[in-house]
Image: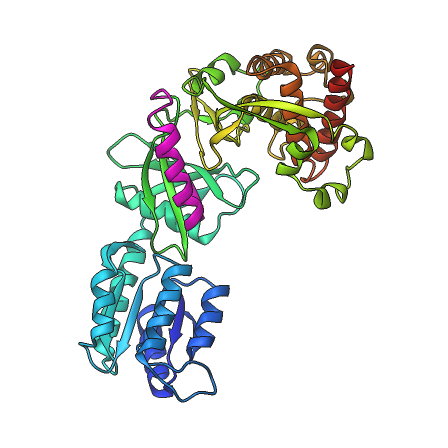
Amino acid sequence: MRVLLIEDEDRSVRQTIESLQHVFGEVAVTVVGSLAEALRAIETQFFDLAICDIQIRSDESSLDASEQHGIAAYEALHLHSPGTPVVFLSAHASVDNTSSRTASGGVADVMGVPAFPLTQVVVKGDPAKIEAYFRRIREGLADLALCTVFDAGDSLDEMFVRAVQVYGRSIGSTSAEVTPMSGLSKARVGLVRFMQDSNPDAVVVLKLDSQERIRHEVALYNRYVANRLTVGCFAPQIRTLDSGLRGMAAVASSLASPSSSSLFSRMEASPPPVSIAAVRSALSGWTAEVDRITTTIGDYRRDLLDDEVFVELPTFRSELTALDDVQIEISRKLCHGDFHGENVLVDDDGRVVVIDFADCGVLPSSLDAAALELSLIAHPKSPIEHCWAEVDCSAWADADSFSRNGPWSTEIRALRDWAIAESSEIQALVVYYGQACWLMKHKDPGAARASEVAAAALQRIRALLA
């Protein structure tokens, strides 16, 4: 447990910590005595629980204890870390300001406690009442622990495990196996298989990210996905968890097939059991061109990676900016926006399901095909290192020559044809160039291959413009 205690009376601090330790045993308590200290803690840390005296000072050197300072600390916590339960310590149980916030705080499933009031008031100096409050949380955490989480990949952070357990217990599961599927963002994503005693396994994709990012993704999903893509081609978002996760939130998306796994993992087979036509068909609801924009090749790339970062990359070469001033027209339509091999799932029957819609929107028409192809070449999670012995990306512009000696020749040619069919060869090449430059900021050897692709794309653009 990680607890923020906002209290400036030594006696009350001692009593509260003793009550915490009596109920939870080991607990990490951050104690602050003023609004200024509380704001610093709230801005730099996340907590499972906040305990706040209603009357605190504005700063360490003041004697201006006021309810308004306690309310300001509460509002800052609510803004920075929504979903964190707060208990007010009050000398008078019926303080108007505190009571109004209790009424408007709402309820949520918090750390295994269903319909738990997010804001409550406890009379100061009453250990029995505050310990009763703590025990509800302890019992909830004990219930979550009944769902054992097994990690099939790299180590999972504590809040991801908690989110898995919250969802698992809501469906009566006693164990879950997680296959990590994280991409290039800071979000944690996993394919989670929940085992249940008397029912078939349930499989979901669970994503943990900041509250803001999860809210944004849910809004994009509702706007662009649920009513546009064909049912069965995307993982429906079935539940959002936004409380009791130390300021984070999670979204669970269901999968129809328990045999689903990432396209990257499927590409390791020889030959790969993946149909690019099926992948393309999954996005068939996003076919109509929305608009066209006129830009330069340099400005297109700068929207993805600005000059200051670009020129400092270890794989940067000056020739990669040679066509920066060339003007180009780009057609745009609805696209996924982050269409790499971890965001495309394929089951044993070849059915394709798309996940993770945090970046979808009106984007260059060739982007999804280009991003998927380049993810096979340069994404850190790609199986290319142990599937393709010698990758010569200097020949990338000619899809046939480039892929001839590799394991994915059919798939790469199909992706290239898809990208060009969405607009034109020059437009597609500009999109490939921009995506390759963006991938250069990640680690070698993928960054080195991305640099070669960017150079090859520019060389082909130059030839087409001649």
Q: Position of residue 189 (x, y in %)?
A: 47, 40
Q: Nearer the viewer, residue 335 or 170?
A: 335
Q: Residue at x 81, y 31 (%)?
A: 319
- Residue 26 visible somewhere in the drawing: no
Q: Nearer the viewer, residue 460 or 345?
A: 460
Q: Is residue 40 left or right of residue 70?
A: right
In the orientation shown, which residue stands out farthest toward the bottom? 63
Q: Which span of residues is magenta-colored?
A: 207-232
Q: What scheme was used to colour the molecule?
A: rainbow
Q: Is residue 367 left or right of residue 230?
A: right
Q: Is residue 176 magenta?
A: no
**Is 207 situated above or below 130?**
above
Q: Residue at x 32, y 56 (%)?
A: 111
Q: Position of residue 43 (x, y in %)?
A: 48, 65
- Residue 329 visible somewhere in the drawing: yes
Q: Is residue 230 magenta?
A: yes
Q: Quadrant of residue 62?
A: bottom left
**Is 91 situated above or below 314?**
below
Q: Residue at x 52, y 16 (%)?
A: 274
Q: Quadrant of residue 125?
A: bottom left
Q: Position of residue 144 (x, y in %)?
A: 32, 52
Figure quadrant of the N terminus: bottom left
